[in-house]
Image (spheres, helix red, strand yellow):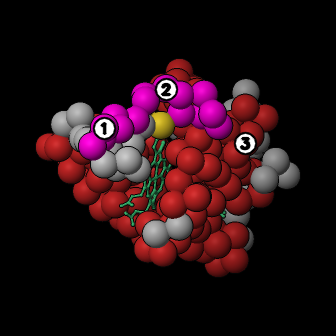
Amino acid sequence: MDTQSHLGLTSRSLHWSIAIGFIALSLIGIYMANTETFSLYPIHKSTGIILFVVILLRVCWRLKQGWPAPVGQYQKIEQLLAKLTHWILLLGTLAMPITGMLYSGMSGHGFGIFGLTLVKSNDDPEQPGEVIPYNELLSAIGEQSHEIIGYALVVAIVLHIVGACKHHLLDKDRTLLRMLGK
Ligand code: HEM
Ligand code: HEM
């Protein structure tokens, strides 16, 4: 259970597993897309789908529990900014795997989890190695939103980490320690 002075194991494990997984997937995604390292695509997709399950659990947990209460008294604007960032991060973690699946599914490339096919590729019978999109518009929407939301979240995550450091180093409060289980 979460209290004002202590965050329970569920909140902490969900936060840190998603934080580490999400940062790793963002770095791999940016690297593989910019260097066209296609061998990394199945690993990125499989891990992203597995993380999606954990992300869904976290969303359910937050809807059931509400947000953790701030550890102290802060200005209204600061509380509002923290709440806004948390909502952006929560919704962003949902949007990334959904848009990734939309793009990979509709582009005809397909996706699965480490060899287990969930949406099969739509191979072009006339050009071996090429695929035919199932739906070009949905594929383009998926690709663009995966990229734009992905880069926007990198900024939001940096601000979130700066905020956590500010609490710990300047305000010297328990915000970060509470998330670390101390
Ligand atoms: C939490 C999950 C995920 C995160 C944080 C994430 C993040 C990213 C990022 C930052 C990029 C680089 C964007 C670009 O430069 O185009 C990317 C690319 C990509 N992601 Fe994800 N992703 C996630 C899940 C998924 C899933 C579940 C799939 C598909 C099933 C997927 C498929 C792709 C593909 C195909 C690309 C390459 C796009 C291209 O070549 O233009 N991603 N991802
Ligand atoms: C090194 C990286 C990170 C640090 C140091 C960190 C630190 C923290 C801290 C201290 C809190 C508690 C804030 C409070 O009590 O008001 C928190 C909450 C939160 N963080 Fe992070 N965080 C990191 C990465 C991430 C990432 C990558 C995401 C999502 C993409 C994320 C999403 C959230 C969300 C949604 C909350 C609200 C509480 C919850 O649902 O767990 N964090 N974070």
Q: Is residue 125 magenta?
A: yes
Query: Disc 2 to disc 3, how far (Cα)?
Result: 30 Å
Q: Is mark 1 on a helix, strand or loop?
A: loop
Q: Which residue is drawn at the image coordinates 43% and 30% (left, top)?
A: 120
Q: Is residue 104 left or right of residue 57?
A: left
The residue at which mark 2 appears reads as 118
Three-letter amino acid code of the residue under disc 2: Leu
Query: Disc 3 to disc 1, how far (Cα)?
Result: 49 Å
Q: Where is residue 8 in the image (x, y as percent from the top left)?
A: 76, 34
Q: Disc 3 beta carbon < 8 A from ligand 2?
A: yes
151 up-or-down from 113: above or below: below
Three-letter amino acid code of the residue under disc 1: Pro
Magenta span = 112-126
Q: Position of residue 25 (x, y in %)?
A: 57, 56
Q: Residues within 10 Å of mark 1 (few under 14, many from 20)?
A: few
Work out whether residue 92 can be spotted: no
Q: Position of residue 157 (x, y in %)?
A: 50, 64
Q: Which residue is drawn at the image coordinates 47% and 37% (left, top)?
A: 111
Disc 2 vs disc 3: Cβ atoms closer than 8 Å? Answer: no
Q: Of marks 3 and 1, which one's residue comes earlier in the chain?
A: 3
Q: Which residue is drawn at the image coordinates 82% and 48% (left, top)?
A: 181
Residue that protrudes farthest toward the bottom in the picture: 170
The residue at which mark 1 appears reads as 125
| Image mark for residue 12 | 3
Q: In this view, does 129 lie to the left or right of 142?
A: right
